[in-house]
Image: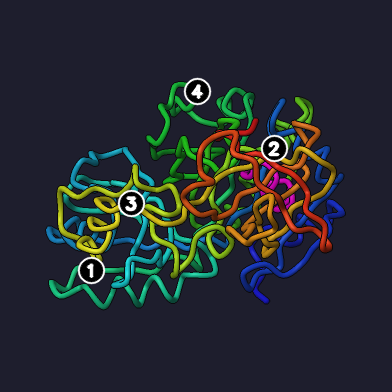
Amino acid sequence: MKNTPFTDKHIAAGAKMAEFAGHYMPISYSGINDEHATVRNNAGVFDVSHMGEFILKGDKAVDLIQRVTTNDASKLTSGKAQYSALTNEQGGIVDDLIVYCVEENKVYMLVVNASNIDKDWNWISSFNHDKVEMHNISEKTCLLAIQGPNATRILQPLTDMDIMNLKYYTFVKGRFAGVENVLVSATGYTGSGGVEIYFEDKNGDAEKIWNAIFETGTPQGLKPIGLGARDTLRLEMGYCLYGMDIDDTTSPLEGGLGWITKFTKNFTARDILEQQKAQGVSRKLVGFEMLEKGIPRHGYDIVNAAGEKIGVVTSGTQAPSLSKAVGLGYVTKEYTPIDALIYIKIRDKQVQARVAKFPFA
């Protein structure tokens, strides 16, 4: 297992640690419910340094990104980012990712899921016919997500960059906590606002930034948060997790990602996805809330009132903000409308649920 530059900090703080995507990561500190509430109501810090980062440089960089991603990267200007996906030749999702335009038509950063770093690198490289300059900077890049309604207010004294007024999916780069070349992005995976900060761990910069954040934030209720609460927070928003809700066998249209699938350009499996759009998909990812007691789990069957299988649960949890269980799952087309009644097969019992809108929270 790999450590992040903050592993010792997590252990010292009493975190419950476990393997995640090949890294030794904090799952919880004070407990998932408490950490969840901290982010929803105030602010918390996630170490997500296990994520992958690629730099693409040169005049043809945007052309390569356009070729392999579903969204339209040509719309990006310096300081803006977009959510996108890589698709395989069958229309499945290789990964979901964020594309950052560092310098328009020149320099881009792609942020990919930790479990897919090698797969994504090899996939993108296989289309790099114009010899775009590519750098995998995952090993040397630190990433902290400071999330919650008070996150930017707490962090603002640590930088001259105006991070309190950053618009969603924009970023700035500059001096933060005395460290140069820190990228601060108004992105995140919680639905509670906040920023993500990227920087290289040189000369103890990781420890310097971590300490500065907590020296400033601890008196204001800022806490370290583990991956357990990250999962409950994203589920309440209906955000997909790669490997659970989307994967190589699910298309963006099936996974509810049609909004990042642009047919104004050529990209891998465009023809297949255009056909799916024209004909309609036979299954779709929906959100649902439990109407009876029971926790939906990944892999549980979804059935209709007659007990016939109509789909499968991909993610589920007891939502801390809602005091009820919610989940995501694929169901056949006729069961996708809001308020459609479905049943989750839990220990051979059919437990009633209803299809619900995102976000749940």
Distance of label 4 from label 2 (alpha carbons): 16 Å
Q: Which residues are magenta?
A: 226-235
The residue indicated by pointer 2 is: 44
Q: Earlier in the sequence, mark 3 or mark 2?
A: 2
The residue indicated by pointer 1 is: 133
The kind of secondary structure element at disc 1 is strand
Distance of label 1 from label 2 (alpha carbons): 36 Å
Q: Residue flagged by tag 1: what amino acid is it?
A: Glu
Residue 43, percent across and down?
68, 31
The residue indicated by pointer 4 is: 164
Q: Earlier in the sequence, mark 1 or mark 2?
A: 2
| Depth check, front residue: 30 or 174 | 30
Look at 19% across and 50% down and name the residue there.
Answer: 263
Residue 319, percent across and down?
75, 39
Look at 49% across and 57% down and name the residue there.
Answer: 200
Q: Residue flagged by tag 4: what amino acid is it?
A: Met
Q: Is residue 228 magenta?
A: yes
Look at the numbered discs 3 and 2 and tell me whether their residues touch, using CB distance below 8 Å: no
Q: Quadrant of the N terminus?
A: bottom right
Q: Residues within 10 Å of mark 3 (few under 14, many from 20)?
A: some
Q: Earlier in the sequence, mark 4 or mark 2?
A: 2
